[in-house]
């Protein structure tokens, strides 16, 4: 049986979020280490266009490294208290609109997952039964992931967290209708 369009979209976003988490984890070994932009990352300028998951450029796509981009939907994806934003990216011009936050914290994985689980379920998302965690590349540590859906699966959210060298890296993403992008 083939994968649905929504399943393919979720898989694409999940791959993007996982790559962002691994990139952020590799950018600094401690919460205070500055993140380093690569040619694959968009310019820190909030007005610079960046690539969307489909690979096309969008003037409305925004990203930043070492902070939260101006206009980021922080109601949809809040920064966990005590966490440091390492990178954000969002595009409100597409349907569905998408956003990703990569942050680090000294909190354990379970605490980070609980915070975002409460945030998403409080916004009407339903948790999807979890698969077994797998080892994060290069760390041997299990990466734990939570998936959420709402609007009959048309809107999705994902949280992935892993601890390496005493720092938890959390990657949070959502793909929602533009009207719910706040």
Image (cartoon, rainbow, N blue to C red):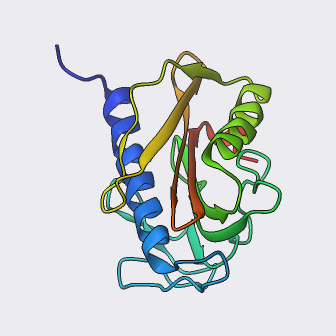
Residue occupying the point 47% across, 84% down: 37
Residue 77 x %, y %: 70, 49
Kindly give the residue lying farthest to the right in the view shown. 81
Residue occupying the point 36% across, 77% down: 40
| Image vertical order of residue 127 relative to residue 98, above or below | above
Residue 117, image quadrant: top right
Q: Is residue 155 left or right of residue 124?
A: left
User: Which of these two is toward me, 105 or 13?
Assistant: 105
User: Which of these two is toward me, 4 or 21?
Assistant: 21
Residue occupying the point 61% across, 36% down: 177
Residue occupying the point 71% across, 33% down: 120
Residue 138 x %, y %: 31, 62
Residue 6 x %, y %: 39, 28
| Image vertical order of residue 145 relative to residue 98, above or below | above
| Image vertical order of residue 62 relative to residue 143, above or below | below
**The N terminus is located in which quarter?**
top left
Residue 56, image quadrant: bottom left
User: Which of these two is toward me, 152 or 112?
Assistant: 112
Residue 2 x %, y %: 18, 19
Kindly give the residue lying farthest to the left in the view shown. 1
Query: How many numbered dots are placed on residues in this image?
Result: 0
């Amino acid at each position: 049986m083939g994968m649905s369009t929504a399943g393919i979209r979720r898989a694409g976003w999940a791959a993007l979020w996982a790559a962002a988490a691994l990139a952020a984890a590799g950018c600094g070994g401690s919460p205070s280490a500055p993140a380093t932009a690569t040619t694959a990352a968009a310019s820190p300028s909030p007005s610079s266009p960046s690539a969307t998951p489909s690979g096309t450029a969008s003037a409305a796509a925004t990203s930043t490294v070492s902070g939260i981009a101006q206009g980021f939907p922080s109601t949809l994806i809040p920064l966990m208290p005590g966490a440091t934003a390492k990178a954000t990216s969002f595009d409100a011009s597409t349907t569905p609109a998408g956003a990703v936050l990569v942050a680090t914290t000294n909190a354990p994985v379970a605490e980070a997952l609980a915070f975002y689980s409460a945030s998403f379920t409080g916004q009407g998302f339903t948790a999807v039964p979890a698969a077994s965690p797998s080892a994060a590349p290069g760390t041997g540590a299990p990466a734990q992931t939570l998936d959420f859906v709402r609007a009959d699966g048309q809107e999705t959210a994902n949280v992935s967290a892993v601890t390496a060298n005493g720092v938890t890296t959390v990657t949070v993403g959502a793909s929602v209708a533009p009207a719910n992008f706040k």
